[in-house]
Amino acid sequence: MKHLKTAYKRIFVGILGLIFVAGTSILLTSHKSPDFEIVKHLDVFSSLIKELNLYYVDPIDPGKTIKKGIDEMLKNLDPYTVYIPESKIEDLTFMTTGQYGGIGALIRKRGDYIMITDPYEGFPANKAGLKAGDIIMEIDGKDLKGLSTSQVSELLKGQPGTTVKLKVKRAVTEDSKQFSFEREKVQISPVPYYGMLDDKTGYVRLSSFTNKAFEEFNKAVKELKETQNAESLVIDLRSNPGGLLIEAVRICNLFIEQDETVVSTKGKVERWNKTYKAQMTPYDTEIPLVVLVNRNSASASEIVSGCIQDLDRGVVIGQRTFGKGLVQTTRDLSYNAKLKVTTAKYYIPSGRCIQALDYTHRNEDGSVGKVPDSLISKFQTKNGRSVYDGGGIRPDIAIPAEKLSNIAAHLFVDNLIFDFASKYVYEHPEAPELKTFNLSDQDYKTFIDFINEKSFDYETSSENAFNDLLETAKKEKYYEVAEDEFAALEAKIAHDRKKDLGLFRSEIKQIIEQEIIGRYYYQKGQLQYQLANDKEVKRALEILSTSEEYQGILNGSIHTDLELNE
């Protein structure tokens, strides 16, 4: 007990020492000052942990308990301010570099075990022969039953060159197979695909803003323009969650004049406020641009799309973006831990901040509300077009997001399309031609037989709502007086699985085709295949092929009702 008390005393004295060094004198601090409040509550917290550890009826894990306390404290701020212990530093490295040591595969939960969903082409899992659908039963002799995805991920990661042994149950055949191979440095490219959409239009998919984003993006753009003679360019930022701000600045610099402002940051620490300008000689300030965005385009994606829009350098197409206008800085803590803390808001060239949620002024119940319409302000682009703050980048051309039919969504979520693709690939080992692949009528009939064998069924939202209404009506004793009406309504809204499989055949068939193509040609091939039926891409091609419409949008002569786009 004595050594524990001594340890706690040393910890607390150390904390007080740090505070004193930072310029806070305990004896001279007012009881109402923020500094005194910090010291007071650190003392309370230290005492509380000591008492719990000494007297709580069961043993506690001090590290886990304190980590939980830190996490809950930070939740009261915003979801981007997080504590990163030493054990999780590799995750931070992956977010900023796209690099980690491991086997190179996406995984997800499947029953009691974890399933491989997407082995990356050319990395250890793929080279060893692991396939999508394989269930990982053991890692280095350890049974994985009941483990979470994150727990299994930690076991799969490791230093490049170290050996990992896997026991898997194969999809379709359910045979067990042993694999042993070395982990490698896995580097995920921020540009998973680029190519020509037609004879004149280049396309680049940018999936993240890691420290290689500018390098890979720049290489793709130059190859498209100089080798494949691209005369216009589509930049796809859909579902790009962001990353490093400086990479976004450098990418914008390719297309805008030197010394143009890309983004500014403003926070509590004034000396950290900064204006980021285009510092390099631009690559091409004339090539027509279209930027594709959606609701999952965030942060650095919004800096790029917002800069292009504010400077009237290109047309933005899609859905309103996520609305993350906050900047994070990583600060070093003791014992190799780090704090990723929100230190500023960013402002794009027109002067607007596109932050959608107000974490500073929470509702009475603690929930976070959107910036109200009454506080949304109008700004001007370089050509005088009206743009708005307070809720993401509103596209110049808004295209409603596609929603899956009920049956297609259930087939996807229930892994039936995934499982059918595994079966199809097992029965068709030769890869089909990427550009001409088409699921035949017989293949679709085989799919229907496959899901019938699985006794697949589902409920629509209307049926769920009806069941809730029925239960309420019975509780309130209205059901008896309207039993016939309830029966008639139930019959009218009841889904017809056979009918839906025909009605939504085109949609279901397209999802199956994409899943199958991904098995043969991996992520790059799947992205390439999707472009053929991509309505945002088709609209981009229309605008880029019509100079009058493209220029009309940018100079404001064609009104796009930005304020109405959601």
Image (tube, grey):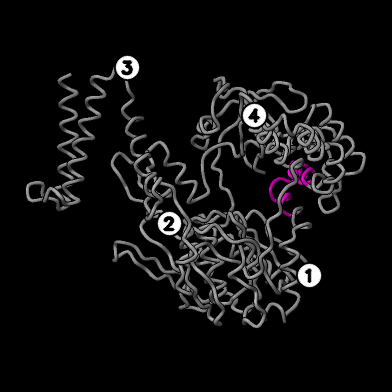
> Mark 3 or mark 1, which is nearer to you?
3
Q: Which mark is residue 199?
A: 1
Q: How many marks?
A: 4
Separation of disc 2 and disc 1 at Cα? 46 Å
* 514 in magenta: yes
Q: Which residues are magenta?
A: 511-528
Q: Is residue 194 magenta?
A: no
> Can I make out residue 132 in this image?
no
Q: Which quadrant is home to the C terminus? A: bottom right
Q: Main secondary structure of the magenta part?
A: helix
Q: Quote the CA–CA distance across marks 2 and 3.
A: 41 Å
Q: Is residue 501 left or right of residue 3?
A: right
Residue linked to disc 2: 358
Residue 326 quadrant: bottom left
Q: Please tell me the numbered disc located at residue 49.
A: none
> Which residue is under mark 4?
110
Q: Residues within 10 Å of mark 3 (few under 14, many from 20)?
A: few
Write the residue at 66% across / 33% down: 473
Left or right side of 455 for 371: left
Reading the chain from its start, which is encountered first: label 2 or label 4?
4
